[in-house]
Image (cartoon, grey):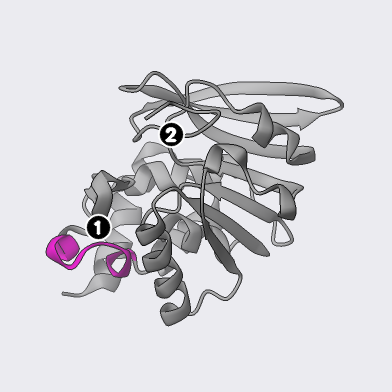
Amino acid sequence: MDYKDLREAMVRDQLLPRGIRDPKVLWAMEHIPRHLFVDPAVQSRAYDDSALPTADGQTISQPYMVAVMTELLDLRKNDKVLEIGTGSGYQAAILSILAAEVYTIERFADLAEKAAERFRTFGYPNIFVKAGDGSLGWPEEAPFDRIIITAGAPEIPASLIDQLTPQGVLVAPVGDRHSQQLIRLVKAAGELQRTYHTPCVFVPLVGTFGWQD
C-alpha cells in the first residue's frame, strides 16, 4: 500500500474539509506514519476516517480528533507537553515533532511498554513514557506548557490544572462516560478561561480524579 498517498488523502479529504487550518498540524499529520501505530490486523485501515481498536479495549483516535486537539493546543517548538493516555503512541508522536518534549502517561503497563518500544524503534527521542494514574499528572516533571487528555473526564482534574504553567493551555474531552465535548482551558492572569468545541466520544479517564473503575 502507498501509505504516503493515503496520508495525503487523509489530510485532503478528512482534515481540510472539517476546518483544520494550522499548517504545522497538517504537516505533522501528513508526515507521521499512523499505520505504524495500529495493530497489524487493522493496518490497512490506518488512514480511515474512524477510531481503531488497540489492546486492552482502548482505541487510537480518529485522525480528525487527533488533528483538532493538536490544533487547539496551539503548540510552540519550545513547549513541554504532558499527555494523559498514551494508547498506541500516535498522538504523542504528532506532538513530538511540534514541541520540545512530550511526557505521556498510560494506565495500562503493557500499552505503555509497547508505545515506548515504538518510540525507540521509530526514533522519537523526546518522548518520555510512564505507566500510572494519569489523573494525577506527572508532578516530578511539572510544570507543563501544554496538557492534553485523551480520555473522557467527568471534569478537568485540579491536579492537572495545578501542573500547567501560567498562560498554559489544556485540552480535554469532558462529559459523561458515553459522550463528551472538547474543552480548551487557558490559565491566564490567575483565571481559567474555557472555550467549548466539538462533541466527541473517548474511552473514560479512570483514576483518582477521573472515573472509578
Q: Position of residue 132 (x, y in %)?
A: 51, 49
Q: Which portion, as a residue range, is magenta?
A: 34-44
Residue drawn at 49 percent across, 28 percent down: 210
What amino acid is at disc 1? Answer: Tyr
Is residue 129 among what the camera can see?
yes
Give me the disc on residue 161: none
Q: From this viewpoint, which residue is outermost toward the right?
A: 189
Q: Position of residue 9 (x, y in %)?
A: 27, 59
Helix, strand or loop under label 2: loop
Residue drawn at 35 percent across, 69 percent down: 33
Helix, strand or loop under label 1: loop
For the residues labelled 2 and 1, the Cα–Cα distance comes to 28 Å
- Among the two numbered marks 2 and 1 on one chain, the one whose residue lies closer to the N terminus: 1
Position of 200 compared to 140: left or right? Answer: left
Q: Position of residue 24 (x, y in %)?
A: 56, 58
What amino acid is at disc 2? Answer: Val
Which quadrant of the figure has residue 47? bottom left
Along the line of sight, which residue is nearer the eye, 33 or 151? 151
Give me the disc on residue 206: 2
Question: Given this view, does label 2 or label 1 mark the residue nearer the observer?
Answer: 2
Residue drawn at 71 percent across, 47 percent down: 139
Is residue 51 among what the camera can see?
no
- Binning the other alpha carbons within 10 Å of mark 2 as few (below 14), some (14 to 19) or many (20 upward) gives some
Which residue position holds label 1?
A: 47
Residue drawn at 34 percent across, 46 percent down: 61
